[in-house]
Image (spheres, rainbow, N blue to C red):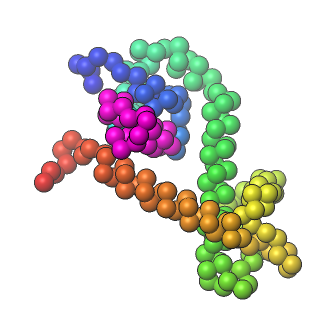
Amino acid sequence: MINQPFVDFYSVLRVKPSCDAKALECAYHDLLKMYHPDHGGTVDTDKFNRIIEAYRVLRNPDKRAEYDLLHSQNNPDEWEFSAQGDEDDLDVRSALTDADDHARMLMFLYKKRRENAQNAGVVGFYIQKLLNCSDDTFEFHKWYLKEKGFIVVTEHGTLAITIEGIDHVISISRSTRAEKLMIAKSSPEEPGEAQA
C-alpha cells in the first residue's frame, strides 16, 4: 500500500471512515451487485475490482487500522469531521438495525407458523425479548409489519405471520442465497491462500 499511489477506499465503497463493519458490508454488497460483470447496464470491471480491493483491506481490522493512518494523512479534514460524529450515519445505522429486526421477527414467526400452522400466534413479549428492544421500538416494528401486511394480531392477541409475510421471507431468503453464491464466485482469493 505504501509504495502505490493513494486510493481512497472509503470513497470507493461510498462510506465514511467512521462507518461500522455492518455499513461497510452493506455498501460492499450493494456496489458489487451494481458493477458485477453479469449485471447488464452498470457493468464496470475496473470499479468492480477496486470495490473488492477496498473491502479486502477495510474488512480486516489490522489492515484497516494501518490504512486509516494513511487515509488520515491524505484526508485530515474528513477525519476531523468524522470524529465529531454524523447524524446521517446514525440515522442510516438505525434504519439498518430496524431492517434486521424486521427480518428476525418475520423469520421467527415464519418458523412458528411452519411448526404449527393452525396455532401460529406468538405473544409479543417473547418477540420483544428476542429483539431486545424498548417498548416504543417494538411498537414501531409491530406497526410497520402490520401496515405492510406481513403480520396480524390474532383473536387471542398474539402475533402471527401472514401469507404476504411468508412470501416476503422466501423472497429475501432466495435473494440472500443468490447474493452469497455470486459473491463467492466473484471474490478473488486472499493473498497466501492455497490455489488449485
Q: Position of residue 46 (x, y in %)?
A: 32, 29
Q: Quadrant of residue 94?
A: top right
Does 26 appear in magenta?
yes
**Residue at x 62%, y 62% (from the top left corner):** 168
Residue 83, placed above or below residue 149: above
Q: Main secondary structure of the magenta part?
A: helix
Q: Is residue 187 left or right of residue 59?
A: left
Query: For the image shown, how many numbered marks are present on the structure?
Result: 0
Please provide percent x and percent y for residue 144: 77, 55
Task: Say whether residue 17 is left or right of residue 5.
Answer: right
Furthest residue to the left?
196
Viewer-nearest residue: 84 or 160: 160
Query: Does residue 173 show up?
Result: yes
- Location of the N terminus by quadrant is top left
Please name whichever residue, 117 or 167, is drawn nearer the observer in this view of the structure. 167
Locate residue 75, reporting x and y percent: 46, 15
Q: Residue at x 59, y 19 (%)?
A: 81
Residue drawn at (71%, 70%), measured in percent from left and top? 162
Residue 8, above or below 127: above
Q: Residue 77 vs residue 73: left or right? A: right
Quarter of the rendering containing residue 120:
bottom right
- Can residue 128 be seen? no
Stretch in magenta = 25-49
Q: Nearer the viewer, residue 142 or 66?
A: 142
Q: Is residue 36 above or below residue 87?
A: below
Q: Quadrant of residue 155?
A: bottom right
**Where is residue 151 drawn, in percent x and y?**
74, 66
Q: Quadrant of the C terminus?
A: bottom left
